[in-house]
Image (cartoon, rainbow, N blue to C red):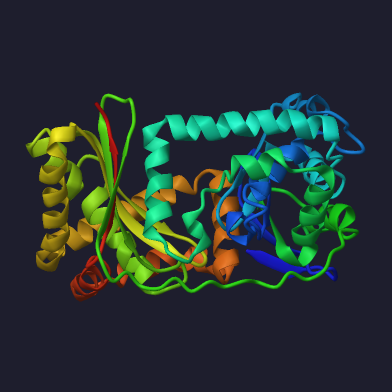
Amino acid sequence: MHKITLQNGLKIIFEHKKSNSVVVQVLVKVGSDHESITERGISHFIEHLVFEGTTHRPTNWDLSNEIEKVGGSFNAYTTNERTCFYVKVLKKHFPLAVEILADILQNPLFNPKELEKEKNVVMKEIDLVNDEPRFYQWVLLQQNLFEKHPARYPTYGDKKVIKGLNQEKIKNYFHKYYAPSNMVISVVGDVKEWKKRIIEKFIGLKGQKVRPVKIVEPPATKTKEVKEKKDVANTYIVIGFKSVPRNHPDSYVLEVIDGILGRGQSGRMFTEIRGKKGLAYDVGTEHISDINFGYFAVYATINGKNVEKVKKLILDELGKLQKITLKDLNESKTFIEGDFYLDIEDNQKVADQLLLWEHAKDAELLNKFIPKIKKVTIGDVKRVAAKYFQYYTMAVIEGK
């Protein structure tokens, strides 16, 4: 791994990997957590809008065709804490990948006509999330799990705010956060002159330094249950617990707990709730460990009459963590190891993980992830389970 910082503050991480493909990914340290009440949804909206044309490539077709005509792919995503853009192409087209990303991140048109059109697209995306209980259950959980942290607001934003966005607001927000000192680029593949190509296209990027904002979320002191009715056949429940950010030592222990409880069809939650009792179709766990917040959750799709029964089974399984065996611990560790290394055979996953760890603290931590998992003990699991699984928030979407 090579890491350099340009004069303008832009960081570049290069990971040499023998492959026919190369991935170039850019992380911008801005997401919905950085938005004020009058900006909710603007980070996600800008992610959409930069693909709608630049001064050199004025339409979406002009941009997408450049990558797709060589068989490549490009995409983007927005979270609470970051916005990422990536291009994946054959390694001989590496200069093109750099050129396209540099263009959309430095020369977006923010055409008023495209702006209005994209508002309709984003509105439909919001409706899609709200219509689909498997997506919306996470929105409902986070809204009620967090009290002060902006993670309680959905990344997609507020419809009223989005309807009121104009070119001036978007440009001001873009120029504030899309500054070189607030961005990191990762390159993964078998390419040469990676430094030269990126310097050529990104050294002209300018912007003021962005001050990081840290919000302290108070610990949970009570249990909470919230319910919403929807015209759907199933009932969806999620039980969530506040935990810790990615860089906290306990996040590795929570990964091991996730492996014990939630791995595939052999995890304890699946085995007890679906395998033995047949009370759910979709059941599992989720460990979210981001830069400034974290939570652990158990979810299940069930018949409405079984809410209390399934809740009890979930809480019972969490309680049984105080009695795990060495076999339980080691199987979780080998699951995490296999899942991790198989996942990062994909260049894009490596590029993404390098950026995530660099955002948390240091990209080198990617290579220390499995060694830290292997150091987790039975005592660690018992301590962490007792500490974080005391008070929960349960979100229920009630079906017919």
Report whether 306 appears left or right of 231.
left
Q: Does any portion of residue 272 appear in the rendered image?
A: no
Which residue: 36% across, 66% down? 243
Which quadrant would the N terminus be assigned to in this image? bottom right
Which residue: 76% across, 69% down? 5
Give the vertical position of 240 relative to 220 (above or below).
above
Give the vertical position of 318 relative to 230 (above or below).
below
Q: Nearer the viewer, residue 342 or 394?
A: 394
Residue 219 falls in which quadrant of the image? Answer: bottom left
Report whether 297 appears left or right of 208.
left
Which residue: 37% across, 34% down? 133
Which quadrant would the C terminus be assigned to in this image? top left
Q: Does any portion of residue 250 appear in the rendered image?
A: yes
Q: Position of residue 393 (x, y in %)?
A: 29, 56
Q: Nearer the viewer, residue 87 or 283?
A: 283
Q: Position of residue 4 (x, y in %)?
A: 74, 68
Residue 384 falls in which quadrant of the image? Answer: bottom left
Give the vertical position of 344 relative to 205 (above or below).
above
Give the vertical position of 225 relative to 117 (above or below).
below
Q: Position of residue 315 (x, y in %)?
A: 15, 56
Q: Position of residue 309 (x, y in %)?
A: 10, 44
Report whether 152 appears left or right of 205.
left
Q: How many marks?
A: 0
